[in-house]
Amino acid sequence: MQGGGGVEQPMQMVLRAKHPSSLGSSAGDEDEGEGSSRSALSVFKAKEELIERRKMEVREKMFAHLGRVEEESKRLAFIRQELEGMADPTRKEVESIRKRMDTVNRQLKPLSKSCVKKEKEYKEVLEAYNDKSKEKALLVNRLIELVSESERMRMKKLEELNKTVDSLY
């Protein structure tokens, strides 16, 4: 392609043919002017056809290139999907397990608080139980002492009574 110069030259010829520079026109000049205007017109049409053909060639090349670009884009998208799949084939399972772990963690928090609370209550109750058991043991020991002392005193009293009864006979 020749830039804009190739189109301007036939246009100038057409303009010269339509507007001849000489004021006096003879029949020979008219035939020559008409022939040159036809020649200029045919050159102009030829150039226009050439430009149109080249425009179509460029358009076809562009569409062919776009088609290749689309194919490459599809191939790259497929490759990207394959790479993502290869990166972590168990990603879905891992995500599922993580979600379940989060759910279990949320459930564990109140259970943990409840467990701590119940352990505290258990310790308090156990301490109270142990205190009462010690108190009971002390009371049982005191009771045993009292019963033993009472038996000893009664035995002593019985012996005295027995001596008194024996002395009467």
Image (tube, rainbow, N blue to C red):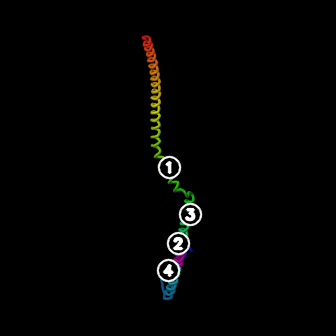
Kind of residue at disc 1: Met
Query: Which labelled disc corresponds to residue 101?
Result: 1
Whether 149 is among the magenta residues is: no
Inter-mark Cα distance, 3 to 1: 33 Å
**Secondary element at tag 1:** helix
The N terminus: image quadrant: bottom right
Residue at 48% across, 85% down:
25
Extent of the magenta region: 49-63
- Compare marks 2 and 1 and give the one earlier in the sequence: 2
Mark 4 touches mark 2? (CB < 8 Å): no
Q: Nearer the viewer, mark 2 or mark 3?
A: 3
Q: Could you classify mark 2 by the number of other residues whose Cα lies within 10 Å: few (under 14), some (14-19), or many (20 or more)?
A: few
Q: Residues within 10 Å of mark 3 (few under 14, many from 20)?
A: few
Q: Earlier in the sequence, mark 4 or mark 2?
A: 4
Circle 2/circle 3 CB separation < 8 Å: no
Does residue 148 lie above or below 105 as drawn?
above
